[in-house]
Image (spheres, rainbow, N blue to C red):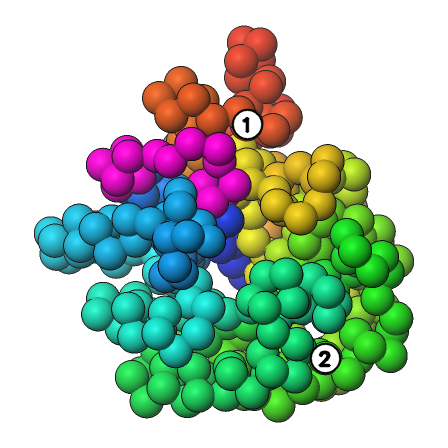
Amino acid sequence: MKRKLEFTDVTLRDGLQMESKSIPTDDKVKLFEKLKACGYARLEVTSFVHPKWIPQLADSEAFCEKIFAKKDEQVGPALMAFVPNEKGLERLLAFPIEWASVFIATSETFNKKNVNQSIQETLEALEPVVAKARAAQRKVRVYVSTTFGCPFEGKISPEKTREVLKKVVALGPDEIALSDTIGVARPNDIQWVTTEFRTWFPQDKTALHLHNTYGLALACAHTAYQVGIRQFDGTTGGIGGCPYAKGASGNVALEELAYFFREDAGISIEGFNQMLSVGEFLKKDLGIQTHSQLIAIRDRGGELYGLK
């Protein structure tokens, strides 16, 4: 495949929702503006869920009002926000956000803990969400969580994984993100799932959402790339995590993914410098710990090898 790599930065949603303290709205706006300059294909900017469940993103409307207050004539990344249900979608539709992302898990236990529904109940609840989003000319991404392992049920059987994935495909989403929610996938897990999944759903509409708990995210991304996946998620600095898995670290650092695929990503040294400056903003201005080797190299006074 010759299709260019595309990166979705989920720092503002998946990254910030795991922080123990809430970040002021104006600081989130500053972070958004810095991320816009990195050249990513898409930014997931917030989550329209009840503040009780994710207090760190309780300001989703106020944040969106600020970022859309000034019309930007320049072409930038596509924007996406998470919605848990129809009510969340209604809140999203008040803003010109192109993509709505939704959740389902391959694990009954994980699904129940996240949305207090069975997998079948979630599938039924997502049908009107997809339909209403389409009617409003918005696109829909479905995150399929615990595709490669669950903190409660362990490894989900291939039969159960196939069953859930086929039902998600039947919803007719514009994109499906196969998600290693707790970072336990190994390359051979990625190999069989992505190879089989492409027989049911287009590869150019398939993304991989990786966490780096065991330090295998880049190896998994490489395997997925060899299979044909060209869309990857990550957070700046590798921040984030999973609230239901003790010891789970954050998402794969997006700047590490970009560096790993640098010949195909088409990102200049200026682009990498911008990514790393966002990491510095997270650390020094927002007090958020990062988990990126590239940022650590810069902290030690080093330069990035192989970039001109």
Residue picked out by circle 1: 290
In-front residue for pair 2/120: 120
Residue 193 image point, x, y percent: 80, 69
What residue sits 26% from the left and 40% below the top?
25
Quarter in which the N terminus is drawn: bottom right
Q: Which residues are magenta?
A: 15-30
Q: Specify the principal SS of the magenta part.
A: helix
Mark pair 1, 2: CA separation = 34 Å
In-front residue for pair 142/203: 142
* Amino acid beneath label 2: Val
Q: Is residue 152 magenta?
A: no
Residue picked out by circle 2: 164
Residue 136 image point, x, y percent: 29, 84
Instruction: Report which quarter residue 90 is drawn in.
Output: bottom left
In-front residue for pair 233/74: 233
Is residue 7 in view? yes
Q: Is residue 120 above or below residue 221?
A: below
Q: Residues within 10 Å of mark 1 (few under 14, many from 20)?
A: many
Q: Residue furthest left?
A: 70
Q: Is residue 151 above or below residue 256?
A: below
Q: Residues within 10 Å of mark 2 (few under 14, many from 20)?
A: many
70 on left or right of 284: left
Mark 2: secondary structure: helix
